[in-house]
Amino acid sequence: MNQDTICAIATAQGGAIGTIRVSGPDAISITESIFVPAKDNKKLSEQKPYTLTFGRIVDESEVIDEVLVSLFRSPHSYTGEDSTEIACHGSTYILQQVMQLLIKQGCRMAQPGEYTQRAFLNGKMDLSQAEAVADLIASSSAATHRLAMSQMRGGFSKELAELRTRLLNFTSMIELELDFSEEDVEFANRDQLHQLADNIEKVIARLVHSFSVGNAIKNGVPVAIIGETNAGKSTLLNVLLNEDKAIVSDIHGTTRDVIEDTTNIDGITFRFIDTAGIRDTTDTIESLGIERTFQKLDQAEIVLWMIDSANAAKQIEELSGKILPRCEGKRLILVLNKADLIDSTQQDALISNLSAFTTKDIYHIFISAKQHSHTDELEELLIKAAQLPTVTQNDVIVTNVRHYEALTRALEAIHRVQQGIDSGISSDFLSQDIRECIFHLNDIAGEVTNDMVLKNIFQHFCIGK
């Protein structure tokens, strides 16, 4: 159990109001030692929980600020400990003065994520809910906010708890047979066990498969912009991001490394990747850039193949053998750029020649990135190609890599259970695989997580949370 009392500034710099959080066994007494109530001289320690008390923070006889102090008593607080929150004016000087007074009276500065870590250790939330706090703070779209809220409210935890309960019932029947092994008694009907294992496998498999959607929602749908040199890839990136992120030049081979950034289009986060132009070259640095182009192409879910409209037939002929095999299973959009340099008759002829590429998985569009022409229609095409479902706070979608890895291992274990039942292996081996599945599910909730894992998770939180 933590014996230290911690403090930290919990609000961003520059606001009109600043909040300092104090938590630990001496939180109330330490806050009381620097706080003077404005009325009735009633000490902070004598106040009821969940009350606000107006008064002054003082350093001996000097008044630092007029503040409001919120009071929470263990175990009914965010951390499960005695806690106070001091709301003062947002001046950096005032906040630092109050922090110095608290530390002088026995507090120590909180580590990143230490409040949420204490909430987890004190049983106020499981580990998946604690991780959702960081996701909620970092949410940048309606979808990421909904997913984080669902996880923080326990939607994911509830599903895991139901799985663990069913698995424990499963293994209890199996292990009961082991106690009566000499009598050759079968307590668990194998057909019923197989049906139960199949149902559990479907739930875990659904959660595992949801990660591709969850990862795209959380980190952005990866979109690789590829094509020959000087096709307008960097210009398009700057248009989509609405900033001059990439250098634009008429010189071939300007982009020699990948450039990445994210933007939100109609509530969906896209991670755009501008790549080096594909061409035959003897330049060592440019060759490395082209090699990275193909690496990013393999990682992308959507591919924007930028083609110079004036030279489209030649570029498609030269690059289709290199690009199309790598786009299998991806959404490919042929972006015919510099369309302002060709007339409508030439465009119609190009569309006719592109008939081999216009399938349900391959789209095409004429644009002029330089003149921002038809780029709005391209954004609409990107939203269509993303194929992301509408997310509500009731949806259980995996967004965390650690959860995905644990679920994958749990899925492997339940597959072994299914195979074991089919092959008629002994109860002790079945029980071992069931318990391994339970172990990996428990790992998500934090019931078996070691200190190194906890440190790695919470060190990425912001200070004050």
Image (spheres, rainbow, N blue to C red):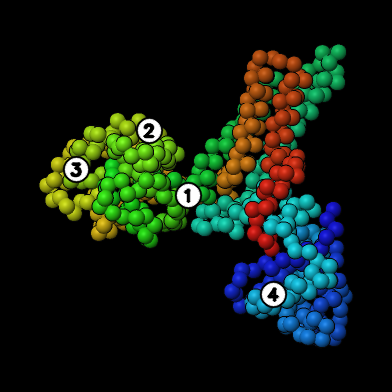
- Label annotation for residue 220: 1
Evaluate whether residue 344 shows in this view: yes
Q: Is residue 233 above or below residue 184?
A: below
Q: Callout 1: helix, strand or loop? A: loop
Q: Given this view, does label 4 or label 1 mark the residue nearer the observer?
A: 4
What is the spatial separation of the Cα atoms under label 4 and label 1, in whole angstroms?
Answer: 36 Å
Question: Which numbered disc flags the more N-terminal residue, 4 or 3?
Answer: 4
Residue placed under numbered mark 3 in the picture: 311
Evaluate whether residue 330 shows in this view: no
> Which residue shows up at 34% across the image and 57% down it?
239
Question: Which numbered disc flags the more N-terminal residue, 4 or 1?
Answer: 4
What is the spatial separation of the Cα atoms under label 3 and label 2, in whole angstroms?
Answer: 22 Å
What is the spatial separation of the Cα atoms under label 4 and label 2, in whole angstroms?
Answer: 55 Å
Residue placed under numbered mark 2 in the picture: 326
CB under 8 Å between callouts 4 and 1?
no
Q: Callout 4: helix, strand or loop? A: helix
Within 10 Å of disc 3 (Cα), the crowding (few <14, some 14-19, many 20+) is few
Please state which amino acid type lies under the numbered disc 4: Leu
What is the spatial separation of the Cα atoms under label 2 and label 1, in whole angstroms?
Answer: 21 Å
> Which residue shows up at 65% across the image and 23% down it?
416
What is the spatial separation of the Cα atoms under label 3 and label 1, in whole angstroms?
Answer: 32 Å
Please state which amino acid type lies under the numbered disc 3: Asn
Question: Which numbered disc flags the more N-terminal residue, 3 or 1?
Answer: 1
Position in image of residue 388 (x %, y %):
45, 46
Residue placed under numbered mark 4 in the picture: 95
Q: Nearer the viewer, residue 28 or 204?
A: 28
Please state which amino acid type lies under the numbered disc 1: Gly
Q: Given this view, does label 3 or label 2 mark the residue nearer the observer?
A: 3
